C-alpha cells in the first residue's frame, strides 16, 4: 500500500486511517524514560561534578535558586539541540519532500519518520515538565508557556490515536510540530544568554549585544 505525503491526507485517511506512529500509544512510557534520563544527567553528571569542574566558583557562588536555574539552562539548551539534530531530517522530508509519517527513517529501517516525531515531541514535553518540577522560581509567563506547550503537545498525540474520529489529526500534529520548531529555535538563545550572563557578569557591552541578539531571535 503506497503511503502519500501528509498534505494529501484527507483522501488517504478516508480509505486507510492510520495513527502517526506505532509507538504513539506508548507515549507515557517514552516520557517516563525521558524524565528518568534528565534526572540521571542532572543528579549524577551535572550536579555531581561536571558543572563545578567547568565553572568553578562562578557556579558555587550562586544562590541555590540561581544554581538550579543555571543547571536547567544547560539541560534545556542541550535537549533542544538534540531535538533539532534528531528531528531536522524527518521534518524537512515530511514538510518539504514527499515522505509521510510512515516512511522509513532511512532505507531498510523499521523506524519511521512518525516514530522520530513522537520521540522528539516527548523530549520537548519532558524537558518542560522537568523545568516546572526542578526550578525553584519561575515567572508566570514561563509557567503559562510550559503548561500550554505540555497540554498542546500531548493533546496532539492523543487525538492522533483515533484517526477515524479525528481525520485531520496528522495535519494538526504537523502544525504543532512547525510551531515547536520555532519555539525551540527562539527559546534556545535565551539559555545561552543567561549562561553567559552568569559567567561574564562584568562584561556589560558584550552582554548587551548577547541579550539584543537573543531578543531579536525571540521576536523573529
Image (cartoon, grey):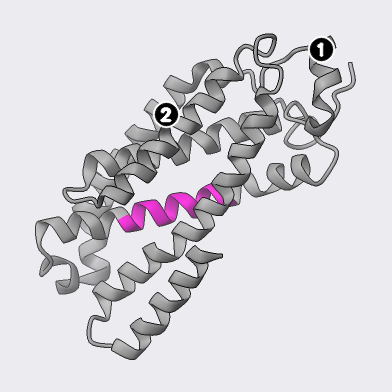
Tell me residue 219's x, y (percent).
51, 65
- For label 1, the crowd category at 10 Å Cα-Cα, with few meaning under 14, some 14 to 19 and many 20 or more, is few
Would you identify the image quadrant in which residue 167 lies?
A: top right
Tell me residue 76's x, y (percent).
38, 52
In the picture of the structure, the residue carrying the numbered disc 2 is 31
Quarter of the image that includes the C terminus: bottom right
Q: Is residue 62 magenta?
A: no
The secondary structure that dominates the magenta segment is helix
Residue 28 versus residue 99 in the image, above or below: above
CB atoms at circles 1 and 2 under 8 Å apart?
no
Which tag is nearer the camera, tag 1 or tag 2?
1
State the residue at coordinates (61%, 19%): 160
Tell me residue 214's x, y (percent).
44, 71
Would you identify the image quadrant in which residue 206 lies?
A: bottom left
Residue 173 versus residue 211 in the image, above or below: above
The answer to whether 183 appears left or right of 106 in the picture is left
Identify the element where label 1 is drawn: helix
Mark pair 1, 2: CA separation: 31 Å
Residue in the foreground of this view, choosing between 146 and 60 = 146
Residue in the foreground of this view, choosing between 30 and 51 = 30
Tell me residue 30's x, y (percent).
46, 26
Residue 14, can we see it?
yes
The answer to whether 49 appears left or right of 89 in the picture is left
Write down the region rendered in magenta.
73-84
State the residue at coordinates (24%, 71%): 55
Disc with the residue nearer the chain's start (1 vs 2) = 1
Identify the element where label 2 is drawn: helix
State the residue at coordinates (41%, 56%): 77
In the picture of the structure, the residue carrying the numbered disc 1 is 14
Residue 84 versus residue 205 in the image, above or below: above
- For label 2, the crowd category at 10 Å Cα-Cα, with few meaning under 14, some 14 to 19 and many 20 or more, is many
Amino acid at each position: 500500500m503506497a503511503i502519500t505525503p501528509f498534505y494529501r491526507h484527507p483522501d488517504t485517511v478516508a480509505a486507510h486511517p492510520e495513527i502517526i506512529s506505532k509507538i504513539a500509544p506508548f507515549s507515557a512510557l517514552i516520557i517516563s524514560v525521558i524524565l528518568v534520563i534528565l534526572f540521571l544527567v542532572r543528579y549524577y553528571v551535572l550536579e555531581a561534578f561536571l558543572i563545578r569542574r567547568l565553572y568553578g566558583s562562578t557556579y558555587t557562588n550562586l544562590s541555590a535558586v540561581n544554581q538550579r536555574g543555571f543547571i536547567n539552562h544547560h539541560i534545556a539548551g542541550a535537549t533542544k539541540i538534540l531535538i533539532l539534530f534528531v528531528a531536522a531530517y524527518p521534518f524537512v522530508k515530511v514538510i518539504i519532500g514527499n515522505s509521510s509519517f510512515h516512511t522509513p527513517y532511512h532505507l531498510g529501517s523499521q523506524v519511521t519518520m512518525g516514530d522520530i516525531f513522537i520521540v522528539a515531541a516527548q523530549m520537548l514535553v519532558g524537558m518542560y515538565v522537568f523545568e516546572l518540577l526542578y526550578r525553584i522560581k519561575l515567572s508566570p509567563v514561563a509557567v503559562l508557556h510550559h503548561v500550554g506547550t505540555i497540554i498542546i503537545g500531548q493533546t496532539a498525540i492523543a487525538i492522533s490515536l483515533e484517526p477515524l474520529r479525528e481525520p485531520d489529526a496528522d495535519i494538526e500534529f504537523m502544525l504543532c510540530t512547525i510551531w515547536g520548531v520555532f519555539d525551540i529555535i527562539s527559546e534556545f538563545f535565551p539559555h545561552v544568554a543567561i549562561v553567559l550572563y552568569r559567567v561574564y557578569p562584568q562584561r556589560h557591552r558584550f552582554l548587551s549585544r548577547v541579550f539584543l541578539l537573543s531578543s531579536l531571535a525571540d521576536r523573529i
